[in-house]
Amino acid sequence: MDVLFLCNRNVIRSPMAAVLHNFFISGHLGGMAESAGITPGEPDPLSRAVLGEIGLAITEPPRSVDEVKLGRFDLIVALSPQAQHRALELSRNLPTLVEFWHIADPSLSDGSREQLLAAYRAARDELLRKLKHRFPTST
């Protein structure tokens, strides 16, 4: 199953979800994941840092959903209400499923660098929990 993870700016939640999916899920179940945003932002160093803590990396630059060929995806996972609305609008004539996963946007957190990293880790870990629940593997 090919999956597109969609969020607002394609800099935190959606790229983390795609990297986690491709590392933990794709090798067991096949299919690949990509990510996009409603409007692409600038790369986020904290999302890259928390993936680096577990040996993974975001290698793709942020991109817009308008740059993606949606018809090749079996599933679009929207990670914000705005992304869900956009996904439903774009996929209405496609045989593509759309799901919404509520994942808090860690960029809205305040505090010290360590407090911010804790919010980003929480988003990373929640994405991984949801991935393993949605795409169970035998391992």
Image: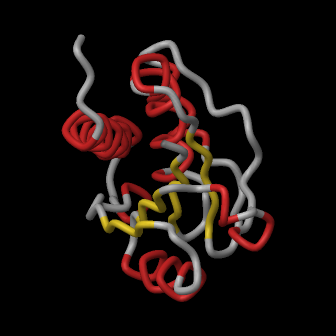
43, above or below 86, in the image: above
Residue extending farthest front: 95
Left/right placement of residue 93 relative to residue 51 reads right
> Residue sitting at 41 percent across and 25 percent down?
29
Give left or right: position of 64 versus 115: right
Quarter of image, res 110: bottom left
The number of numbered badges drawn on the structure is 0
Q: Where's residue 49, x and y in %?
A: 52, 29
Question: What residue is shown at x 54% (from left), y 45% (from top)?
Answer: 2
Viewer-closest of 40 and 117: 40
In this rendering, does residue 6 appear at all? yes
Q: Is residue 118 visible?
A: no
Q: Residue at x 25, y 43 (%)?
A: 134
- At a point 68% along the width and 74% down the height, the residue shown is 39
Q: Which quarter of the figure has residue 73?
A: bottom right
Residue 59: x %, y % from top left: 72, 32
Q: Position of residue 125 (x, y in %)?
A: 27, 35
| Camera-nearest residue between 22 and 8 | 22
